[in-house]
Image: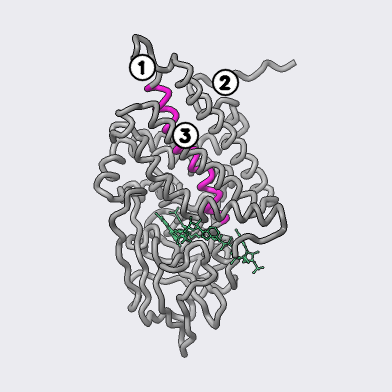
Amino acid sequence: MTTPTKRPQNNPFDYLNLESQYPEEVRLVRDTIRSFVDEEVLPIIEKHYEAGTFPMHLGTKMGEIGVFGITTPTEYGGSGMSSLCYGVAMQELERGDSGLRSFASVQNSLVMYPIYQYGSEEHRKTWLPRLANGSAIGCFGLTEPDFGSNPGGMLTTAVKTNNGYTLNGAKMWITNGTLADVAVVWAKLDGVIRGFVVEKGTEGFLTQEMKGKHSLRASVTGELIFQDCHVPESALMPNVEGLRGPLGCLTQARYGIAWGAIGAAMACYESALNYAKTRIQFDRPIGGFQLIQEKLVWMLNEITKAQLLAYRVAQLKDDDAHTPQHVSMAKRNNVWMALEVARLARDIHGANGILSEYPIMRHAANLESVKTYEGTHDIHTLILGADITGIQGFA
Ligand code: TGC
Ligand code: FAD
């Protein structure tokens, strides 16, 4: 007979001791990033959030501690680790701030992944080692002003010339757009969507930061503008054609977001639990009132279910048995769950819940973007609806 495993007392988030199932290397990654977030992110993130700036030195540090290229093979400078490892890393980063996780999602899933999967050997050798150590930053240009949920309608074009291609068009809402040394850009060549690797500084390629965001303020979002931008023949990614190219990248990033959202929820839950135990009203801690307990239980219950969902999708992914629809279910549920947890946490904090002294409003506002990007909540509903009925509900 085996002794039942006790819930780890020092980890209020892991009610079912799920982390005991993680291999040692995953726990090591979790601990490294957890310490990084506690020591280097949390003390400064509110200041950057208020100023609307990304803490660039943390981008460099993330490169140093191995946050980029987690699943990229080691021969290209990556860590060659599992999808579970990648997911747990995203969870820990988003416990700090969604902007930090966004930065890492774009670098890992939307830039390194397509360069590795769809790029030429020259693309891989030129960019992957630099992207892995953080000395180069990437961005991913798919969304356009008039084509968000329906990227297949994009207007950006590539026209073949004697010695390359000319790009014309505009991309909007691009994370790291103005910071990036390299952009993975999707454009129609003879009516077919193709990917291009475009370097910063290429003539005719301009970027502009988007201002006025009330969400993801510690993240840079920009526009990419292509005006008769000539790129060499080698800029074309040779190994993919059609919408399945960018959508394949989105499956990777959405998977990371499913984990990341758990991190944001963990931060809100931990703050609410501590507050409930110490805030006195009617001569007793508010955590003793049944209505507050119900909220805390709901939060932990949903976090635990989200962890199980993310963990199962990680297993499927590592066995190469996942579908994009599995990932849609996890992204859709976990981001919704995190937003609900953030709202309940704000409630429990009363007036204090709106202060930047607590992380709640920052996470809640961030999660509004996370709910929209990488496929809105409703688009994932339609993806799942089409999968289970066999009837496409988009148009
Ligand atoms: P549809 O006909 O369904 O599919 C076209 C082709 O793509 C294949 N496919 C996928 N492949 C891989 N992964 C997926 N998730 C895939 N989904 C579809 C499909 O099999 C087909 O392949 P083939 O070979 O038969 O041609 O395409 P559709 O035009 O009907 O669109 C479907 C829809 C609406 C689901 C899709 O367009 C969609 O997902 N829209 C949402 C757009 C979106 O998520 N944009 C995200 C932009 S990037 C971003 O937000 C970054 S935020 C980064 C950060 O800061 O963290
Ligand atoms: P729309 O597509 O106009 O949707 C508006 C509303 O209509 C939504 O509620 C949607 O669910 C609904 N809707 C649309 N179609 C249907 C339908 N068929 N049935 C029912 N409802 C529908 N993009 C990139 O390419 N790269 C990035 O790095 C990037 N980073 C981003 C960072 C931030 C902070 C944000 C906010 C966005 C980012 N995006 C990026 C863009 C993001 O992917 C899009 O915003 C998203 O795909 C939704 O597109 P949209 O905003 O144009 O909304």
What percent of the width, then of the height, locates residue 201?
32, 72
Q: What element carries label 2?
A: loop
User: Front-most of 96 and 291?
Assistant: 291
- Colour option used: one colour
Q: What element carries label 3?
A: helix
Give the numbered dot on residue 341.
3
Q: Quadrant of the N terminus?
A: top right
Is residue 264 a member of the stretch shown in magenta?
yes
Q: Which residue lies furthest to the bottom in this view?
A: 162
Q: Which residue bears the numbered disc 2?
A: 7
Query: Which comes before the other along the chain, label 2 or label 1?
Result: 2
User: Front-most of 77 and 257?
Assistant: 257
| Residue range (magenta) | 251-275
The answer to whether residue 211 is above or below residue 171 is above
Look at 48% across and 81% down and name the residue there.
Answer: 233
Give the numbered dot on residue 278.
1
Dots 2, 3 in contact, CB < 8 A: no
What percent of the width, then of the height, locates residue 81?
57, 47
Whether the residue carrying mark 3 lies under 8 Å from ligand 1 is answered with no
Answer left or right for 203 relative to 252: left
Dots 2, 1 in contact, CB < 8 A: no
Look at 52% across and 72% down and name the residue there.
Answer: 153
Considering the whole magenta stretch, tell me its main secondary structure: helix
Look at 44% across and 68% down and name the residue there.
Answer: 146
Q: Which amino acid does label 3 sit on?
A: Val
